[in-house]
């Protein structure tokens, strides 16, 4: 049996191109979803875009030779709106960042 902290539900969302998708979202409490209609997925993509821009800004400052960032996003629903969750109840962030510095050798340019 799911406890309230881990309650999920399948919700429909609309992509920017009008496509309808189903998402398993974590219920974050708040008001019940009554007559809110189908929420746009843009709330989630805007969060991902903002996070990516912030990471790129930082990477430009530290100037690694190579970098990769991997992050997982869990979708939540609160008061009828979708939201992207980067951190879950344990407080552990779900980011994996790899940075490399050093000389670029001739082998690397081929």
Image (cartoon, grey):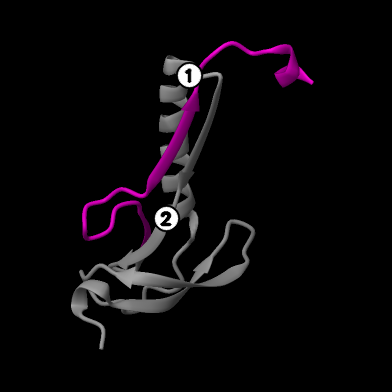
Task: Identify the residue at horizontal 28%, vertical 68% (top origin).
Answer: 79
- Label 2 packing within 10 angstroms: few (<14), some (14-19), many (20+): some
Residue pictured at 42% horizontal, 42% vertical: 96
Whether residue 73 appears in magenta in the rendering, the answer is: no
Residue at image position (34%, 51%) is 86
Residue at 39% in and 44% down = 95
Q: Position of residue 93 (x, y in %)?
A: 30, 48
Question: What range of the chain is rendered magenta?
Answer: 82-110
Judge left or right: residue 78 versus residue 15: left
For the N terminus, give its image quadrant.
bottom left
Above or below, comparing residue 109 to residue 9 in the picture: above
Q: Please name whichever residue, 102 or 39, is drawn nearer the observer in this view of the structure.
A: 102
Reading the chain from its start, which is encountered first: label 2 or label 1? 1
Q: Which mark is residue 73?
A: 2
Residue of label 1: 60
Q: Position of residue 103 (x, y in %)?
A: 59, 11
As drawn, 81 above or below 105: below
> In the displayed structure, does residue 103 sit left or right of residue 29?
right
Q: Return the x and y of residue 5 as percentages of the image width and height.
A: 21, 72
Secondary structure under tag 2 reads loop
Q: Quadrant of residue 29?
A: bottom left
Which quadrant is home to the C terminus? top right
């Amino acid at each position: 049996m799911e406890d309230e902290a881990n309650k999920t539900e399948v919700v429909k969302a609309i992509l920017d191109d009008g496509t309808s998708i189903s998402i398993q979202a974590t219920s974050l409490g708040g008001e019940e979803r009554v007559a809110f209609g189908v929420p746009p997925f843009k709330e989630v993509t805007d969060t991902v875009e903002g996070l990516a821009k912030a990471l790129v800004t930082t990477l430009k400052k530290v100037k690694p030779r190579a970098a990769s960032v991997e992050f997982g996003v869990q979708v939540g629903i609160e008061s009828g709106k979708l939201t992207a969750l980067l951190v879950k109840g344990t407080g552990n962030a779900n980011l994996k960042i790899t940075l490399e510095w050093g000389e670029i050798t001739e082998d690397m340019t081929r």
